[in-house]
């Protein structure tokens, strides 16, 4: 109920916020709101909302983004009316610049100014009409309304061009200003940033690379590198024939005129500037370059139209040239169709790049987990493996938990073998889709770790994208999650070991503190510790029973007791949800009631078994139950180490601490090892601590409402599956797709049942009955219940088991990595840290200064070594932009390297257009010897993987046809006396006049019937996946055999090894 | 790997935009490349442009940690010719070309020729200066655009703190040394020549540039992480 309430609130809020936004918009900009901009009729507010409407549950958020906390990923609805593009020229007047285009200005008669179509203008014949058009246009079309809402044009011109010394530079400049808020009655104050691009139209040598280029050879350590390079052009040196001048004496006209393009981008707050602008700086730079080239081309058309000719068709001058400066009439670009559409492109680009959260670098987290012995990110590792296994099982029909007796582990491998044999006889394509995909991806993952728009300092540029075409975003996201795990991090994430350690310890400290603060303590008062459970149940959050079914695939269910006897476990046909399996009798009652909706039969057996064997480690187990219960109940709760996903591993910690640890190298012959396996489970205590802490946090944080609903859904849908499990667990064919359904929430999704909204609105009976049963169970739950959860390797990434909550924003992650909970406001934290650093330096006493011995002119000063302090206050957290990979985008965006998109017949064409644009962009602006752009195009419905690849080699042979809606200007349409001329030394071969060829190769690498991938690699991957599966199965089994208290560390090491073989 | 230079520059009433102190970082083995030799001809620097250090030193160095390879060097100007050219150009732009409406916010500018810069202009009250204030620019320049921008928020915080500390110190000194009878009259009569004043004098702190060096070291360490 509460869950539903929350959910409704959430949706209501978003609607409200949207609505209020509009309201706000209308109230403050009534004029703007009422008058649709005729030039930009295609800017619909609503369409830009859709990506945010793409719902993700907390588990998905955790695996995709490293946090389940939706607040960190909340989209921001920009006010589109506040975006602005302004193009100005410096006509030589120090005091005023001329505005050539301003998107905030509506022309009085837009129909009068027909858009100039560059393609239709082939030569000078159309010049006359163009000139007349521009002349007839009203020069100043500013109206009062826009000037109140927008910043003053002349102010913007000052910022863009600067004031003071006039500059004679010819190269591009980039500037960023934080604009002051506008204070007047017409608009609410808003934050905005002005991004400026200055460029020249000149026939002077472009001063690119000079004068420093000559020096750079001497001193190679200062090489200015832009986010994205632009190859600047200058106009032909074509001295005008002038009767008065001796034309031989001059080689050119010495034209140099500066132009500026300004983008005004509204911000949510000044603090979001990094998130909106800088984390997406490469994409914005790309946009700017495209726009600059477009504007340059348009201006060249106008310039070419303004020539004066003498009788012999020699150019004698240009009407726009005044004193070596180009002076176009005001608003000459107004009404230009191509430029008008740029505003919309800008809004969309900013919106998509900012509002669609970028994927966390799970590859890095997993590697950290594997290599650094830091188990903080184990949940990511486990979830990744589980999602792979689930994918194999449910999408590929591969038996991940083969039917076998738990006593015969070799049968397991046999069954796998059989499966392989069977499939090989049935189908030529014996390999799984996933293994084939991973094998295809692996060679390209390095280039996937570079943004599609990025300045790579190499001779060869490779752009790789992955596009998943899907009708089911939920499934696609699982696949994207798996793929994302394969993509390494090309950026340096500062792994400051000291910091990490410090935070670990901080965390522990805090946990300890919170433990003390809690009314309940772990080992001493289990009664009190129950209270959270009670809370959760009364809230209707009883997710645990459902998720557990992962173990249900196996007949033998371990009994609730820690030292279970084998007969007991065998007697239980129905598998109790793993988190409650080991619970003590009272809890079981409640559990049973909860699950009773689904499987009444089971109840007795499970209850019996547990009652018959009261748990030996009662109090401890009760705590662990508590932990899992909390884990699953509160979405906002967090712990760095959720071992509940490992199921019994957490319990193992306890068992190990009691002195008996088992190596499970051979599950059949358990050998008792000394209990030194605690390393892996050091986290147990922390989990614990974090749980108690979590409890205290509860009051401050709103649990994610969606989560609870998820769990209800789970219950609802898992009912039949549980039954299946009991009955058909021995039947492999039936088991597939059913017995492990609860293994992860993803299963749910795979079967298209997870449309949360739909379920919410439908409110099925079972949902109601379930909640009823939850209430019952709550009512009957005795306060003294001390359940325990020696959950076996449950594969379940419990939806509510919130393990990762990395502090991040939508586009970046804070480094050093930190838990969201530890620092609420990074900005404030940084401020106070830096303030104390700076102040202590200001108050520094003199004795620190000493004269360096070796050099008389040099003072040596000891560093004020803050880092020696064990004070976490000294760490400054930085934004680290994430790779441009997203889970799902409702339309294909070329900025993203990994994305899934809805099914669209034009999608492949869009992808290919983007690839052609890649070629053009890098060909026209960079000096790469070879450019390769490729896309791994996955059609989920058809189970097809295509590899589309385009190559461009220099030197080229045939004409490069610019395809699609390319805005590139490489091959300039300007066929005139003044044409673009590349200024690079090697320009001749890269020149637009030079024809280039590109090769396109489309290869269907995988279809259900054939597989053209690298068989060797695929088989290798397949083998690793199988081994993972086997490992999990064995581990699962071990946990069911209570005698074999398996060693978690051994399991972890083996798993790590396998995962590492995939990751590296 | 991006290179950074932290720079304090000012608009000298005699020399125009000029660098006072810049801090760079590099490996210890390259120490000599960053230092200005002691026997170099002292630049034609007026009092306000000069880098005034204790014991008439020319350079300050700090090792991050005794065993580490990173060295932080503060000098009056960069010893590298490339860096000198870049810095000079960016200082000039910062103080006499670029403009911003809100002095409380830093701005960014740059190009592929000279490099990239985040700067913040601040003013220091000095009754003897033209317009009763002196114009300074605190800058972080880098040769890698995107890396520099990713540190915008950290740099902004440092700028605010450093400027705040300097301004407060100067105001404090002004308060203490206020001679209500003389100064205003002197200024009004324009009898006292506009005389260059170092930040050392303005803050009444012999080690203000040592402190700047340490601030810059902290800033560099944080943005290089």
Image (cartoon, rainbow, N blue to C red):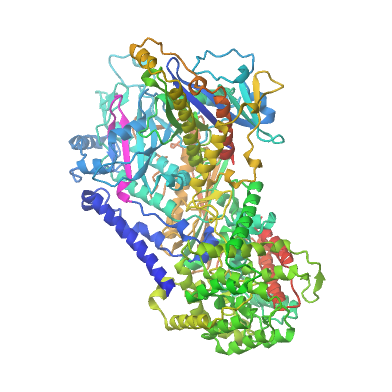
Quadrant assignment, res A568: bottom right
Q: Is residue A980 left or right of residue A865?
A: left
Q: Does any portion of residue B3 appear in the rendered image?
A: no
Front position in the image: A351 or A649: A649
| Quadrant of the image containing the N terminus of chain B | top right
Q: Is residue A186 left or right of residue A380?
A: left
Question: Residue A49, how many percent across, how many down?
Answer: 36, 58
Q: Does any portion of residue A634 appear in the rendered image?
A: yes
Quadrant assignment, res A507: bottom right
Q: How many marks?
A: 0
In magenta stretch: residue A85: yes
Front position in the image: A620 or A283: A620
Q: Is residue A209 above or below residue A583?
A: above
Q: Is residue A410 left or right of residue A265?
A: right
Q: Is residue A802 left or right of residue B127?
A: right
| Quadrant of the image containing the C terminus of chain B | top right
Question: Residue A1062, how many percent across, how many down?
Answer: 66, 59
The residue positioned 39% from the left and 65% from the top of the image is: A10
Residue range (magenta): A79-99
Front position in the image: A836 or A261: A836
The residue positioned 53% from the left and 70% from the top of the image is: A633
In magenta stretch: residue A418: no
Front position in the image: A534 or B20: A534
Question: Residue A388, how many percent across, how many down?
Answer: 60, 67
Q: Most extreme residue toward the top, as rendered?
A: B191
Question: Residue A454, how many percent across, how many down?
Answer: 51, 44
The residue positioned 64% from the left and 16% from the top of the image is: B38
């Amino acid at each position: 109920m509460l869950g539903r309430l929350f959910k409704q609130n959430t949706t209501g809020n978003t609607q409200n916020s949207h609505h209020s936004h509009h309201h706000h918009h209308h109230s403050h900009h009534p004029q703007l709101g009422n008058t649709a901009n005729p030039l930009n009729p295609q800017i619909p507010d609503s369409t830009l909302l859709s990506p945010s409407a793409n719902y993700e549950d907390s588990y998905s958020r955790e695996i995709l983004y490293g946090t389940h906390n939706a607040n960190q990923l909340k989209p921001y609805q920009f006010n589109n009316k506040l975006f602005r593009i302004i193009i100005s020229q410096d006509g030589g007047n120090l005091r005023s610049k001329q505005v050539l285009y301003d998107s905030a200005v509506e022309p009085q008669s837009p129909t009068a100014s027909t858009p100039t179509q560059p393609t239709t203008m082939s030569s000078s014949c159309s010049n006359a009409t163009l000139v007349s058009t521009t002349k007839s246009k009203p020069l100043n079309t500013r109206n009062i309304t826009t000037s109140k809402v927008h910043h003053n044009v002349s102010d913007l011109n000052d910022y863009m061009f600067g004031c003071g010394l006039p500059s004679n530079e010819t190269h591009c400049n980039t500037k960023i200003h934080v604009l002051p808020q506008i204070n007047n009655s017409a608009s609410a104050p808003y934050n905005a940033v002005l991004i400026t691009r200055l460029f020249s139209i000149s026939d002077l040598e472009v001063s690119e690379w000079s004068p420093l280029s000559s020096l750079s050879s001497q001193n190679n350590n200062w090489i200015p590198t832009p986010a994205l390079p632009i190859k600047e052009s200058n106009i032909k040196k074509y001295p005008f024939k002038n009767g008065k001048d001796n034309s031989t004496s001059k080689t050119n006209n010495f034209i140099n005129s500066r132009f500026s393009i300004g983008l005004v981008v509204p911000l949510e707050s000044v603090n979001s500037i990094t998130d909106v602008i800088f984390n997406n700086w490469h994409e914005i730079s790309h946009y700017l370059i495209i726009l600059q080239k477009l504007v340059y081309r348009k201006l060249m058309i106008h310039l070419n139209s303004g020539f004066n000719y003498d009788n012999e068709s020699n150019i004698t001058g240009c009407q726009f040239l005044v004193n070596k400066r180009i002076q176009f009439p005001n608003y000459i670009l107004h009404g230009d169709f191509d430029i008008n559409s740029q505003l919309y492109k800008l809004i969309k680009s900013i919106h998509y790049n900012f509002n669609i959260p970028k994927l966390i670098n799970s590859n890095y987290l997993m590697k950290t987990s594997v290599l650094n012995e830091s188990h903080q990110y184990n949940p990511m590792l486990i979830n990744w493996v589980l999602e792979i296994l689930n994918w194999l099982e449910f999408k590929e029909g591969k038996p991940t938990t083969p039917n076998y007796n738990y006593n015969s582990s070799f049968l397991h491998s046999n069954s796998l073998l059989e499966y392989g044999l069977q499939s090989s006889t049935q189908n030529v394509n014996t390999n799984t889709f996933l293994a084939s995909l991973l094998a295809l991806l692996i060679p390209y993952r390095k280039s996937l770790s570079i943004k599609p728009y990025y300045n790579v300092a190499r001779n060869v540029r490779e752009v790789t994208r992955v596009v998943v075409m899907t009708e089911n975003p939920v499934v696609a996201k699982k696949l994207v999650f798996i793929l994302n795990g394969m993509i390494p991090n090309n950026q340096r994430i500062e792994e400051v070991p000291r910091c990490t350690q410090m935070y670990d310890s901080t965390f522990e400290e805090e946990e300890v503190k919170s433990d003390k603060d809690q009314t309940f303590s772990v080992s001493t008062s289990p009664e009190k510790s129950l209270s959270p459970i009670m809370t959760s149940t009364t809230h209707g959050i009883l997710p645990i029973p459902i998720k557990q079914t992962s173990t249900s695939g196996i007949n033998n269910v371990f009994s609730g007791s820690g030292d279970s006897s084998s007969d007991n476990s065998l007697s239980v046909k129905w598998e109790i949800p793993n988190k409650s399996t080991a619970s003590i009798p009272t809890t079981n009652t409640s559990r049973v009631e909860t699950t009773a909706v689904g499987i009444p039969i089971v109840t007795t057996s499970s209850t019996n078994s547990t009652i018959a064997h009261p748990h030996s480690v009662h109090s401890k187990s009760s705590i662990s139950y508590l932990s899992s219960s909390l884990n699953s109940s509160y979405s906002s709760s967090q712990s760095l180490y959720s071992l509940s996903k490992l199921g019994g591993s957490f319990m193992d910690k306890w068992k190990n601490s009691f002195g008996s640890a088992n190596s499970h190298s051979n599950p059949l012959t358990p050998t008792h090892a000394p209990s030194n396996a605690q390393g892996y489970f050091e986290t147990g205590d922390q989990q614990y601590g974090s749980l108690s802490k979590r409890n205290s946090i509860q009051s401050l944080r709103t649990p994610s409402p969606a989560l609870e609903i998820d769990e209800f859904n789970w219950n609802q849908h898992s009912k039949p599956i549980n039954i299946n499990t009991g009955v058909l667990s021995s039947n492999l064919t039936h088991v597939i797709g059913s017995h492990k359904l609860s293994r992860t929430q993803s299963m749910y999704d795979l079967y298209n049942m997870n449309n949360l909204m739909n379920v919410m609105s439908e409110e099925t009976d079972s949902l109601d009955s379930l909640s009823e049963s939850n209430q019952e169970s709550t009512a009957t739950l005795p306060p003294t219940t001390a359940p325990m959860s020696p959950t076996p390797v449950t594969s379940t990434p419990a939806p509510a088991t919130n393990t990762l909550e990395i502090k991040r924003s939508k586009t970046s992650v804070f480094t050093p990595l930190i838990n969201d909970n530890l620092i609420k406001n990074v900005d404030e934290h940084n401020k106070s840290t830096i303030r104390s650093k700076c102040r202590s330096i200001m108050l520094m006493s003199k004795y620190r200064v000493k004269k360096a011995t070796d050099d008389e002119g040099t003072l040596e000063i000891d560093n004020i070594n803050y880092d020696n302090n064990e004070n976490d206050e000294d760490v400054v957290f930085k934004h680290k932009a994430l790779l441009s990979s997203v889970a799902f985008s409702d339309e294909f965006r070329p900025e993203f390297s990994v994305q899934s998109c809805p099914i669209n017949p034009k999608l492949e064409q869009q992808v290919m257009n983007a690839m052609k644009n890649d070629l053009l962009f890098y060909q026209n602006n960079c000096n790469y010897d070879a450019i390769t752009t490729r896309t791994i195009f996955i059609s989920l419905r058809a189970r097809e993987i295509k590899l589309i690849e385009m190559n461009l080699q220099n030197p080229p042979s045939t004409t490069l046809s610019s395809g699609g809606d390319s805005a590139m200007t490489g091959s300039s349409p300007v066929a005139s006396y003044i044409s673009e001329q590349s200024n690079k030394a090697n320009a001749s071969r890269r020149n637009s006049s030079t024809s280039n060829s590109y090769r396109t190769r489309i290869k269907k690498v995988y279809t259900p019937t054939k597989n053209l991938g690298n068989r060797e690699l695929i088989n290798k991957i397949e083998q690793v996946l199988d081994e993972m599966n086997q490992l999990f199965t064995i581990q699962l089994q071990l946990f069911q055999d209570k005698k074999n208290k398996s060693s978690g560390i051994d399991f972890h090491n083996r798993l790590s090894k396998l995962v590492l073989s995939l990751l590296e | 790997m991006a290179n950074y230079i932290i720079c304090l520059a000012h608009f000298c009433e005699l020399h125009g935009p000029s660098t006072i102190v810049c801090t760079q970082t590099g490996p210890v083995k390259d120490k000599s490349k960053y230092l200005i030799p002691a026997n170099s001809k002292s630049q034609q620097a007026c009092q306000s442009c000069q880098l005034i250090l204790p014991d008439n030193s020319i350079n300050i160095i700090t090792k991050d940690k005794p065993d580490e390879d990173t060295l932080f060097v503060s000098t009056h100007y960069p010893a590298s010719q490339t860096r000198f050219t870049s810095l000079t150009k960016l200082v000039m732009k910062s103080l006499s070309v670029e403009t911003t409406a809100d002095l409380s916010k830093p701005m960014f500018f740059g190009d592929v020729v000279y490099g990239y810069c985040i700067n913040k202009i601040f003013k220091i009250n000095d009754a003897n200066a033209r317009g009763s204030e002196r114009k300074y620019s605190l800058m972080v320049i880098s040769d890698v655009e995107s890396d520099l921008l990713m540190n915008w928020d950290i740099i902004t915080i440092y700028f605010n703190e450093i400027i705040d500390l300097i301004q407060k110190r100067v105001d404090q000194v002004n308060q203490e040394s206020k001679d209500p009878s003389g100064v205003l009259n002197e200024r009004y009569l324009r009898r006292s020549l506009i005389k260059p004043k170092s930040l050392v004098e303005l803050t009444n702190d012999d080690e203000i540039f040592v402190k700047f060096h340490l601030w810059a070291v902290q800033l560099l360490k944080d943005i290089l992480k």
